Every structure is written in C-alpha cells, then in structure tokens.
Amino acid sequence: MKTIYFVRHGRTLFNHLWKVQGISDTPLTDIGEQKAAELGAVFKAQNISFDAAYTSDLGRTRRTSRLILDNSANPDLSPIETKNLREVSFGMFEGDPNDEAWGRVSEEMNIPELRGDSPDEIKIRALAALKELDTTGLAESYDDVKTRINAILSVFAHAKEETFLAVSHGLYISCLIYMLSEEKIHVSAIENTSVTKVIFENGVYKIAYIGRTENL
C-alpha cells in the first residue's frame, strides 16, 4: 500500500488579492509561511513520516514543501520538482481578477452559473471553454490536467517508497479528486495548506479524506 498526502501551497499574495494565479507565481504571505511550518509540525506530532517528497516546480509550492519538511520528522528530505503537480494553466487570464476572468468566460460561453467564487466543480467543467477563449495556447482543459495527474500517479505507483508528500495547487487537487471519484465527489474549494490523503492499494487509487488541517 502507498499513501500520498496532497497539500495545497500556503496562502500567497495573489490569493490575498483575489487574482487568477495558475502557472504564474507570487510569494507566500506571512500567514502562508506560518501555516506551512505549522502543518509540518502537525505531521511530526501525528507520527507521519515521509519516504519521499514531490512538489510542483512553482515557487509557492517549493517554498511550502520546504517549510513543511523543515518542521516535520523528515527535515533532510529534498523535494523532487515536477511540472506534473503544477496548477492548471489559465493562459491569457493569468493575473486577472478572479471575478473578471471567470465572468468573461461565463459571458462569452453562456455559462451563467460561473463566477469567481463558484465551486471548483463548475470551474473544472468550464476549463474547456476557457481554453477555447485563450489566445496564447497555454490554457489547459480538464483533459489536459488529467494527463498530468495520471503521469504523477504512475510515478507514485511504480516508486519503491510507500509514503509521499506531494505539494500542489487548489484547482489541480480538485481535478484529482474529481477524476479519482469518477466525477462523483463535488468539491467547492481546497483551502491553503490543507491535506488530501490518497491511498494506492491493489492497483487502485482511493481518496481517504479531503482538505483536512488536523487529524491527518
């Protein structure tokens, strides 16, 4: 059996400013750094030890993973960086106010229920429309993200290690949950520095819990 603890990065400047972040990057806020360090201490206090650590290659996840590990039972682990844990790319909408970006997709693609504060499930379904509007060629659909998710899950499945830390992003983790649950679990949002636990056993991935900050 393998266990993967997927963690959303700490709160960032763009999270605070309510802007689309995607594959663009802003630093962790002071509270983001504090919560990441605290989460590492929670893992340690609950006797959770990692055999390996993976992180998205973006700065906010690299910093989060380092803070978690430095305060965990595994301070000597070096996280492996991978694009397969990156956030969804939003192309030309990167850096826009959330309400403005999703509102434009809503208006132009006739998705009236879509807003900046809409549940992640609605945003996942709207990614294909967002990609269609994007003129940069960088935006991703849900199917694009699933390809990256399957790639990292294959790495975990074939690794010799058994317990993993995987630091990633909010909408990415929602896509992971949506995919693993065969689109049956409906996620509103994944909070910063929350933990989603996934088990791999007998060739099958299963979700143990979603978005916890304690009782891990």
Image (cartoon, helix red, strand yellow):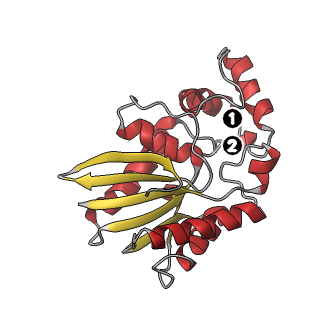
Q: Is residue 200 left or right of residue 43?
A: left
Of the numbered discs 1 and 2, the one sitting upstream in the chain is: 2
Q: Label 1 belongs to which residue?
A: 134
Residue type at mark 1: give it: Asp
**Residue at image coords 77%, 65%:** 30
The picture quadrant where one finds residue 113 is: top right
Q: Nearer the viewer, residue 58 or 166?
A: 166
Kind of residue indicated by mark 2? Gly
Mark 1 crowdedness (10 Å alpha carbons): few <14, some 14-19, many ≥20: some
- Asked where in the image residue 32 lies, by quadrant, the reply is bottom right
What x and y, as percent, mark residue 143? 46, 37
Residue at 62%, 65% (x, y): give it: 36
Instruction: Answer left or right for 54 relative to 184.
Output: right
Secondary structure under the numbered disc 1 in the rendered image: loop
Q: Quadrant of the N terminus?
A: bottom left
Quarter of the picture holding the C terminus:
bottom left
Q: Residue furthest bottom?
A: 76
Residue drawn 30% across the image and 46% down it: 206
Disc assigned to residue 91: 2
On the rendered structure, is 201 left or right of 115?
left
- Contact, CB < 8 Å: mark 1 with mark 2? yes
Which of these two is toward me, 175 or 136? 175
Can residue 27 be seen here? no
Residue 145 image position (x, y, % from top left)? 49, 44
> Residue 33 bears which disc, if any?
none
